[in-house]
Image (cartoon, grey):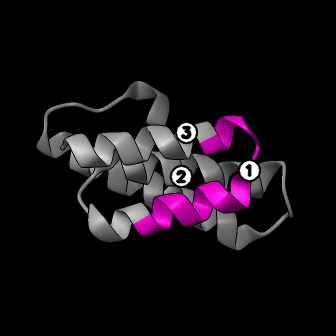
Amino acid sequence: NHGSGQAYWTGIELVREGRWDNAQSWFEDSLFQYPDSRHLHAGLAQVFWYLAIDGPQDSANLESAARETVKAVELGFGHSKVRHTWL
């Protein structure tokens, strides 16, 4: 979907700028509109990984990162496309 692709790249730009809280909100809001976007789930997983590892040490972020990664992979299986970097 073109709209979810644009949303993904906007979120990734926020990640690149280190605006983690904004990126988290962006991905979560975008997933409300595009719940079946594997790319948006992967982007949100990336944000949660950062927050779990380099941000405030919170096990909930680690659990959220794992959940979003699994969701991205499951959706990818439906398209016969799974990025190995998500694993």
Q: Amino acid at mark 1?
A: Arg
Q: Secondary structure at mark 2?
A: helix
User: Which image quarter holds the N terminus?
Assistant: top left
Viewed as shown, does residue 25 lie left or right of 69?
right
Residue beneath the point at 73% across and 69% down: 59
Kind of residue sitting beneath label 2: Ala
SS class, disc 3: helix
In this view, 87 is above or below 60 = above
Q: How far across and how far down the image is residue 84, in percent?
A: 41, 26
Secondary-structure class at tag 1? loop
The residue closer to the viewer here, 63 or 45, is: 45
Queried whether the magenta region covers residue 78, the answer comes back as: no
Residue 50 at what x, y percent from top left? 72, 48
Pointer 3 local density, CA inside 10 Å: few below 14, some 14–19, many at least 20: many
Q: Where's residue 18, x and y in %?
A: 76, 43
Nearer the camera: disc 2 or disc 1: 1
Q: Which residue is mark 1?
A: 19
Are the residues flagged by discs 2 and 1 in contact, CB closer than 8 Å?
no
Name the residue rendered at 44%, 46% in the picture. Answer: 42
- Can residue 87 be seen in the rendering of this structure? no
- Which residue is tagged 2? 45
Give above or below for 29 relative to 5.
below
Pointer 3 residue: 12
Residue range highlighted in magenta: 14-29
Whether tag 3 and tag 2 are in contact, CB under 8 A, the answer is: no
Q: Earlier in the sequence, mark 3 or mark 1?
A: 3
Q: Nearer the viewer, mark 3 or mark 2?
A: 3
